[in-house]
Image (tube, grey):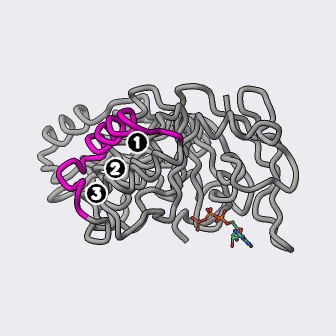
Amino acid sequence: MLQAIDLHKKFKTKEAVRKVNMQLEAGESVGLLGPNGAGKSTTISMLSSLIMPTNGEVLWNNVSVNKNPEALRKALGVVPQEIALYPELSAKENLHFFGRIYGLKGQLLVERTEEILQKIGLTDRKNDIVKTFSGGMKRRLNIGAALLHNPSILIMDEPTVGIDPQSRAYILDTVKQLVEEGMTLLYTSHYMEEVELLCDKIYIMDQGEIIAYGTKETLKSLVSDNQTIELKAHILSQKFEEALKKYFPTANIRKEDEILLITMPQNEEPLATIFAIAAKNAVTITSAIVKVPSLEDVFLHLTGRALRD
Ligand SMILES: Nc1ncnc2c1ncn2[C@@H]1O[C@H](COP(=O)(O)OP(=O)(O)OP(=O)(O)O)[C@@H](O)[C@H]1O
């Protein structure tokens, strides 16, 4: 459907993007994850034909976007990182304005506007001017503007940056629903938990390049297939530790700061057994946390740096 082939972008002396290859199929939800400055915005600006690559090309349904940008623009909704709205106009007037740019008019424009207001939860504020809106409401309207022409593919550039947790949750729910309804999505973020929640396939980007690509499971298995159970108890007796070692001979069991760490493959489900062994040894467990590798760990593993540096 949408394909990036060997994209490069140089701004004067700065090589912002190098050798980027990506592919989005219809109905897929794809994440582009990377820290600030990794080159995500530059990549999606090229993918949505807002800027020209220095090298490489973008194909939409196997045709170069360079040759026929209109075909992609009709099918594509882009939610930019910067809010692009008219603060002196109402929510409805803003949507009418953007709808007309997409060629909507008359009854169709009125109906689409109402549908979108409903979808983004702003129906009851539709006549209020945008400058009175919270950051989260502006972001929702920004998303609404990109949906008016009923695109089949949506590209979102960090749509939850700088908003309150409640608005963030609302936006994530809305995006999840769009994906469930069949929208093809490219979602960029430096929040790994958002990408994990919304996306099936993930590209990890750092310093202008794609450094890893795959499903969440594939990426996490780059780090390890293990899980670690962190146990806290009133008293962690030596006898209990030895009993655990006997029952789980292949597990790595160690104590750090009064927490017992038990590492073993993820396909084992040891909690019930651990609790039974504790009861038998008169140990009261106060907390048990199961930790599996996160995309954050994958990034750390690949680059030696934390995602949020
Ligand atoms: N127009 C430009 N001129 C010069 N350098 C640029 C330009 N646009 C981006 N860059 C540089 O290219 C690199 C990649 O920027 P980009 O905005 O694509 O990253 P990003 O991953 O989207 O990060 P952020 O989340 O901070 O926007 C950065 O070093 C940035 O400073």
Quadrant of ligand 1 in image: bottom right
Q: Earlier in the sequence, mark 1 or mark 3?
A: 3
Give whichever of 7, 100 is nearer the camera.
100
Q: In terms of image quadrants, where is residue 85?
A: bottom left
- The prevailing secondary structure element of the residues shown in magenta is helix
> What residue appears at the point 52 percent right and 46 percent down from the top-left corner?
187
Is there CB contact under 8 Å for labels 2 and 3?
Answer: yes
Is there CB contact under 8 Å for labels 1 and 3?
Answer: no
> What residue appears at the point 61 percent right and 66 percent down from the top-left corner?
305
Q: Which residue is mark 1?
A: 197
The Cα atoms of the two marked residues, 1 and 3, are separated by 16 Å
Label 3, secondary structure: give it: helix
Give whichever of 210, 168 is nearer the camera.
168
Q: In terms of image quadrants, where is residue 181?
A: top left
| Dot 1 amino acid type | Leu
In the figure, is residue 258 to the left or right of 149? left
> What residue appears at the point 15 percent right and 49 percent down from the top-left corner?
283
Q: Which residues are magenta?
A: 103-128
Q: Which residue is mark 2?
A: 171
Q: Position of residue 104 (x, y in %)?
A: 47, 39
